Amino acid sequence: MKVKFYLAALIFLSLQLELFAQEKTINVEITDPTSKGLLTGTIGVIGTVDDGHFLLRAISKGFSLYGKGVGTKGVLVVEKLNQKYGLEKSRKIEDIPMTVMNKAKDKSFEFFYQDKDKDIWLFYSDAFNNKNRLFRKKLDQETLAFEAPILVSELPIVNKRLDRRSNYSIVRSEDNSKFAVFSFVGSKSNEGSEAYVEVFDASMNSEWQMNTSIPEYDKGGPDTKLYGMIKSLNSNGNIRLSNEGVFNMLSKVDIVKGGNEFMHFMYSFYRGIDDPVITYLKNTDKYLLRMSLIQDKNKDVRLAGYYSNDKKLKQIDGLFVQSLNPFTLAIDKQKFIPFSNENKMDFLYQSESYLSGKEKRKIEKGKEIEVPSNTYIKSIFVNEDNSITLASEYYESYTYNGKIYHVNNDFQFTNISQNGEINWIQNFNKQQKDITLNTNGIYQMYESGTIYFIYNEPLEREIRVGQINSNGEVSAKTILKSSKGGELKKFWLVPGTISKVGDNTYLGVAAKLFKERLVKIEIN
């Protein structure tokens, strides 16, 4: 295995890594550093055209980099980059601020969308005459100005606490033929949420809309605007739009205030009904802990996640899988799959070489192995044989000397057959610890049945790439050094900024204080 380095026109550092000595290669290109203000960060790519890319940046006024903190407002900036990632032009969006946690005073940025004709649209909201209005404006790609706004929706504000500004989100169908705009806002007094879901085709034509009240079934406390926003933006695959235009959502709510017990609810929104179909997964002697959903090759909804035999959810004892009709949510089949000790070993350790002496003695004595409950589902993929691969990550946080440290350690990949059997489980060992979440975690790329990934290894001062194939064979290698004398010179990848910009091509950011570098990833 060989890593090759070379400079291209003194602008890009290009690296190439071949994994498993197979035909697939990961190529990485990195721009020279660009000076930015202390609180300026790239949010991500908002559009790709034949001659370059459009990026969205935020100049912060009181919140942290990359739009992930708390504070007041930020000024948004649209930038046009050429094919060599040089800056051609930029323009501030002065009249539409990005509000993060605080209530918007007037207009509020929501999201960007690029349609099938490669036109780029800015969506924003306001409040007028006790109504929330959602607008879209087309970006002039030559001047970076915006055309006149077009009204998308107008919804009554039934309660002053149910202001939808900063609360609209978007989800695309897998084939990009449709997209849904949705917003859920709720309050304790309402004992539920006001739901808005509207599905459009790729040419921005509305196909259907639903505006209704749905119960939250949350006995533990209110579903506040903040909770609704976090649920929408950090759904980890729990909101899906099918190619047929069915909007499915999985929601977890507390059963007991301040307790660990949860209940999961499934919602189905689709054309021709006035209210969504709602069903729930109730705990019995097994307690559902983490869940995620995906639509499989048979167009069924597949739920998969972990369960515990302990009401206090101290450990994970196995997997839960369920197949549902996406419209009626009728259960086709479901299964609890207990973990054997061998399954737990595969889940916790990449190989026996990672076992400590204490752990080896425990196993030799036949003692039960425990899988910690602070293991979180990050993604779920459906494969050509209709099996699904569940990817999860160990996470914990602690406070030391007044600072909160975030620990993102091992990744776990679990492949489950169409019939609900475990095909294989593979642990991937990594160690990440930082006071910021922005540089922790893994960015995953699914191409032709293989999961590729890129991540920071801060303890080793490295950036690594790897892959796991359909047989559960995993491999990873250092692609860049982030030490002072390394290629990245103390820059760290920000996984949350990475997005797909073309076939097998991804674009993101590596950052350090005051500076950023663009990172292009290609799999070919």
Image (cartoon, helix red, strand yellow):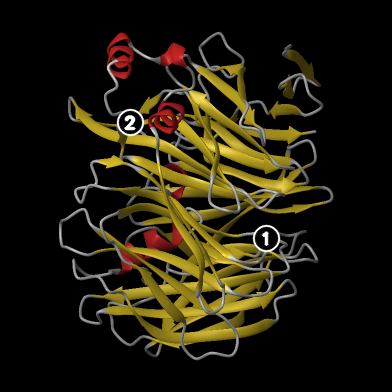
* Image: 498 above or below 342: below
Q: Nearer the viewer, residue 246 or 457?
A: 246
The crowding category of the residue bearing disc 2, from other C-alpha atoms within 10 Å (few below 14, some 14 to 19, many at least 20), is some
Left/right placement of residue 62 relative to residue 516 reads left
Single out the mark in the foreground, 1 or 2: 1
Left/right placement of residue 246 relative to residue 249 reads right
Residue 135, given in percent of the width and then of the height, sits at 57, 77
For the question of whether residue 517 can be seen, the reply is no
Q: Nearer the viewer, residue 430 or 282?
A: 282
* Image: 450 above or below 203: above
Q: Are marks 1 and 2 in contact (CB under 8 Å)?
A: no
Which residue lies under the disc numbered 1?
Answer: 174
Quadrant where the C terminus sits is top right
User: What distance separates the C-alpha of mark 1 from that of mark 2?
Assistant: 35 Å
Residue at left 49%, top 82%?
Answer: 133
Q: Amino acid at mark 2?
A: Ile
For the question of whether residue 305 can be seen, the reply is yes
Residue at left 22%, top 65%?
Answer: 255
Q: Amino acid at mark 1?
A: Glu
The crowding category of the residue bearing disc 1, from other C-alpha atoms within 10 Å (few below 14, some 14 to 19, many at least 20), is few
Residue 256, given in percent of the width and then of the height, sits at 17, 63
Residue 56, given in percent of the width and then of the height, sits at 59, 51
Residue at left 44%, top 65%?
Answer: 250
The number of numbered badges drawn on the structure is 2
Left/right placement of residue 310 relative to residue 423 reads left
Which residue lies under the disc numbered 2?
Answer: 435
- Kind of element beneath mark 1: loop
Quadrant where the N terminus sits is top right
